[in-house]
Amino acid sequence: MPPIEIAKAGMGAVGVKVPHTMAERLLILLSRYREASIAVVAIVLVVYFQVGSDGGFLSPQFMSVVLRDTGRLGLIAAAEVMLMITGEIDLSLSAIFSIAPYVMALMSVTWGVPLAVGAVVGVLIGVLVGAINGIITVRFRVPSLISTVGMLFFLQGIVVSIYNSQPIVAPVEQPFNAIFGQSLYQPSDALLSWHGVTAFTPFLWAVLIVLALALALNRTTFGLHTIATGSNIIGAREIGVRTDRMKIYNFMIAGGCAAFAGIINTAQFTSADPQAGSPFLTLQAIAAAVIGGTSLLGGSGTVIGALIGAFVVASLNNGLVMIGAQATVSDIYLGAAIIAAMILSIQVDRLRTRRRL
Amino acid sequence: MNMQTIPPLAADAPVVLEMTNISKSFGAVTALVDVSIKLRRGEVLALVGDNGAGKSTLIKILSGFHQPDTGTIVSQGKEVRFASPRDARAQGIETVYQDLALIGDLSVFHNMFLGREYRKRILGLNLLDNRKMRKQAQIYLDTLGISIPSVNSTVDLLSGGQRQCIAVARSIYSSPRILVLDEPLAALGVRESAHVLGLIQNLRQQRQVSVILIVHNYNQIFEVCDRINFLHSGEVALDASTADTSEEELIRIVKSGLGRKAIDAAAAEVRPGIV
Ligand SMILES: Nc1ncnc2c1ncn2[C@@H]1O[C@H](COP(=O)(O)OP(=O)(O)OP(=O)(O)O)[C@@H](O)[C@H]1O
Ligand SMILES: [Mg+2]
């Protein structure tokens, strides 16, 4: 046998498998530009509602409503995306959404603590609850689908027991309220004035946070390790990724986002309702995440897609009513959209896994 | 056979790694019982054994993925405890796992640098230097002669053999002291296997890297390995130099399914000093 030579061409012979059938191309396009495909859906919806409402849909007043809903939902949807990428989910976010602003308002009315300070405390509570959710999930190996349901009831129980389910009227402190959600916009105001901007602050905050999360996900070690954790947890661990920590960190981010969304909600309505966040809110957020193109299998997802998905959900919720449908009918469309998005998502995932074999 | 391809290991090559009396159980399953192995600088050690013998478990203890129930690891003369694969990598021990430990959803170049990413500061933020990683990965794979469609493609779009090549390339990128390869040739064709075996030869000759190689093809063992450890039911049943053993003999011992005691007895009778 001749001695082994290390020719440069040694492995050039490995079958170069460039994926180029139609299905594969479509699959790659879909998985790479998931945001683009959902953006197309969003545009079609806008056009449909704009025509159906004789131009009312894109009016500043109506857009303010839709984008406020988008912001609130988008924050929670983006939070779920971070967790879904690691292969987890958090069903307690709606309770965090309720408890954080409740604590803020309570501290304000009982001790006169400024809302801004209360808001920081509220967000920290959200982060803490996230950390507890994460630790229960990774240390005690309780699936997060279960552990966070426990946390949901636990927190919801606490917040309604404080004042016997009574909402607290929160004081108004400017500029806190205007910055974080209260709309000062009047039809006579210019859109690009300060008052005009306050019509959209919840949405603008959501955009800011979603962009920050997108940056973290796509351009940092943290994001890389988050994806690695959800894509192949054993492999990630074998190569030294601290998968448990990555999960806990993402639970903390999710808790913080949900708390912030709740605070925005209270700043807008100047009231802290212990039942502001119903579990339905979390489910809509998960729907928005999936509609936006996040995989149910972990390992991939897009927070920008989630924000667009939240816009689609908010548009359906408000637009259908606007063009004259019964409020109940919008749920039918929403349900159908979620099922369609899930089927598509699973198909894309299955194509991907099949390619692996 | 092929003795000319293995330059003899220097008689005084220092011991770079010693695992002593390692035991490990998973609940009721005993994977390893008092296993001891010794590795010298520039040595290629073959670890063979039936499926389920405990080979992967042993190397996962060395890589810091599992912690042993009992036993010690001495690396470079010092006792070490690896709490995680990070610790082992920091000590210059790189591992190619049987499952390759590649992340299907990440690109080839991100996989290459996972856990030791290049970063740069932009506006005070510590961001990934993707351009540098992409370029380095491309250059490195080119010098190794590994050809893939693109370093940007996600790993799940690569063939099994290509993935194995990426995993091997990743493990040698950081110039490890000790390289551990768990069935690195399993999915490789004849040419690619020869190529990887050539790489191993190169590493040991030029950089004095020590290698632990798990392979099932005994032909390949005799091509590149200095020594063989045969693991049987969680014990080292045979520790022999390839120069003193023939492929036929090894196959006979492995096929016999005998444990350490039986082999010791037989060896003492036939050829004193083999063990
Ligand atoms: N994480 C684990 N949990 C429980 N049992 C395990 C685990 N890892 C390995 N084992 C058991 O330990 C024993 C040794 O397994 P190991 O993977 O080390 O064998 P191996 O020699 O690498 O086999 P193969 O040649 O098939 O790769 C087997 O009985 C296996 O079932
Ligand atoms: Mg194995």
Image (cartoon, coloured by chain):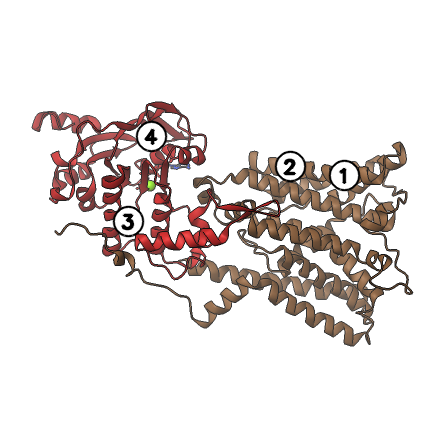
Q: Residue at x 56, y 34 (%)?
A: A139
Mark 3 and mark 1 in contact? Answer it, CB < 8 Å. Answer: no
Q: For mark 4, give the secondary structure.
A: strand
Q: Is residue A14 visible?
A: yes
Q: Which is in the foreground here, disc 3 or disc 1?
A: 1
Marks 3/2: CA–CA distance: 42 Å
The image quarter in which residue B155 lies: bottom left
The numbered mark at residue B185 is 3
| Residue for badge 2 | A131
Q: Residue at x 74, y 62 (%)?
A: A331
Q: What separation in Å lies between label 4 and label 3 (alpha carbons)?
A: 24 Å
Which residue in the structure is indicated by mark 1? A120
Rendered hue of chain B is red
Left or right, residue A276 beside residue B182: right
Marks 4/2: CA–CA distance: 37 Å
Q: Which residue is mark 4?
A: B32
Q: Are dots 4 and 3 on a single chain?
A: yes
Q: Chain of mark 1?
A: A
- Amino acid type for the residue under numbered disc 2: Ala
